[in-house]
Image (cartoon, coloured by chain):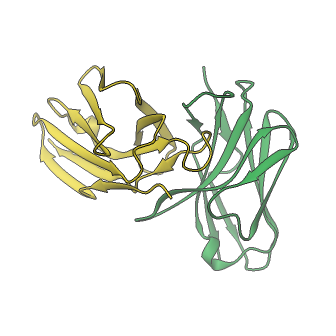
Chain colours: A yellow, B green
Amino acid sequence: KQEVTQIPAALSVPEGENLVLNCSFTDSAIYNLQWFRQDPGKGLTSLLLIQSSQREQTSGRLNASLDKSSGRSTLYIAASQPGDSATYLCAVDGPSGSARQLTFGSGTQLTVLP
Amino acid sequence: DVKVTQSSRYLVKRTGEKVFLECVQDMDHENMFWYRQDPGLGLRLIYFSYDVKMKEKGDIPEGYSVSREKKERFSLILESASTNQTSMYLCASSRAGGPIQYFGAGTRLSVL
């Protein structure tokens, strides 16, 4: 059964710092890996999707990488801002279970201090 | 613009009550999902549906049922609410074969 782990559970950084969030998964047979953002009391917003054949995806100040063979992904946030404060979740989908299902990590709660 | 709407943001119910959580999407998506989210446990899939009247169990279906009579609406039913069902419930939808799921704002349910 696929398991997804995110470390650290919480992270606090001063504004302007570059930071890295980590995600690992136990079964490398995935189709896609996604990073989501969740603001307090809200639903999830998809940030980046990396297909299994890709190594990375970029959107603005965000860059996500994927090393499928080692079961790892990182989300790099450049020049962090207080507005980046949120919980970031990664999720994978693949033949472990149904291709329609996502398996989520428990998230990293990021606080960017002004 | 993509829209997944959950009927209630907050609900308070009593133990033993029958509870309905409603979700509506306006994107003509085939797939719909119900998750619950608990601190430290992430999102766990309760049920999903890939077509009208079709459903499949997720990882934690016990104590829940679902209904999908129309393509745009997916209901989660707690037949007899219990305190351990106090949680944040999130609905999502996606197109057939599409990996990206679009989420509603969530319903925070408290069972007293």
Residue sitting at x 25%, y 55%: A7
Residue sitting at x 22%, y 38%: A82
The image position of residue B55, as x and y in percent, is 79, 48
Q: Quadrant of residue A83?
A: top left
The image position of residue A74, as x and y in percent, is 25, 39
Q: Is residue B32 left or right of residue A49?
A: right
Q: Residue A106, relative to residue B85: is it above or below?
A: above
Q: Residue B58, relative to residue A60: is it above or below?
A: below
**Image quarter in which the C terminus of chain B is found:** bottom right
Nearest the eye: B63 or A1:
A1
Q: Is residue B35 left or right of residue A17?
A: right
The image position of residue B106, as x and y in percent, is 59, 49
Nearest the eye: A21 or A13:
A21
The image position of residue B79, as x and y in percent, is 82, 69
Q: Quadrant of residue A73?
A: top left
**Image quarter in which the N terminus of chain B is found:** top right
